[in-house]
Image (cartoon, rainbow, N blue to C red):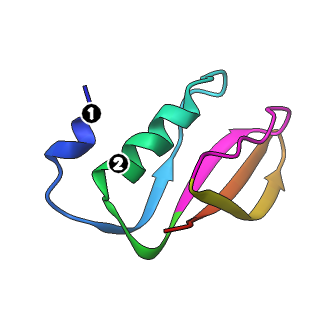
Amino acid sequence: MNTFLELKNTFDVIFLDPPYKDKKIDILFKNIRDSKILKKGGIVILHRHKKEENIMPLKFNIIEEKRYGISKILFFSNLN
């Protein structure tokens, strides 16, 4: 079930901090895209373990990556 569909607002920034070992990140991005909760020009920030392979979700582009200790922070833009 896509709980994003219940949201009435749209957002400039969405921060995702799933468990480090979560492999279903693509589903989160699909739900964000399908529910249209990210404003045009908005960004999605994803917190991951630095050893996790970068994902390239459909219709999103990595615009920046930062590393801090054991973490990496990925910044995505929507390719609408």
| Magenta stretch encompasses residue 52 | yes
| Residue in front for this viewpoint, 54 or 70 | 54
The span shown in magenta is 44-58
- Whether residue 14 sits left or right of residue 24 in the image: it is left
**Quarter of the figure with residue 53:** top right
Residue at 69% x, 55% y is 74
Classify 49 as above or below 16: above
**Quarter of the figure with residue 8:** bottom left
Pointers 2 and 1 in contact (C-beta within 8 Å): yes
Q: Earlier in the sequence, mark 2 or mark 1?
A: 1
Inspect the image, locate mark 1, and give the three-letter code of the amino acid beneath it.
Asn
- Whether residue 15 sits left or right of residue 20 in the image: it is left
Classify 36 as above or below 17: below
| Residue in front for this viewpoint, 24 or 45 | 24
Inspect the image, locate mark 2, and give the three-letter code of the amino acid beneath it.
Asp
Please identify the quadrant where the N terminus is shown: top left
| Magenta stretch encompasses residue 76 | no
Classify 47 as above or below 37: above
State the SS at label 1.
Answer: loop
Instruction: Please tell me how crowded label 1 is: few (under 14), some (14-19), or many (20+) other residues with Cα within 10 Å.
Output: few
State the SS at label 2.
Answer: helix
Q: CA distance from mark 2 to mark 1?
A: 9 Å
Per the picture, the main secondary structure of the magenta-coloured stretch is loop
Residue at 76% x, 43% y is 71
**Quarter of the figure with residue 40:** bottom left
The residue where tag 2 is placed is 34
- Whether residue 5 sits left or right of residue 20 in the image: it is left
Q: Give residue 19's position: percent from left, percent from top.
A: 57, 27
| Residue in front for this viewpoint, 43 or 58 | 58
For residue 48, the mark is: none
Residue at 70% x, 46% y is 56
The residue where tag 1 is placed is 2
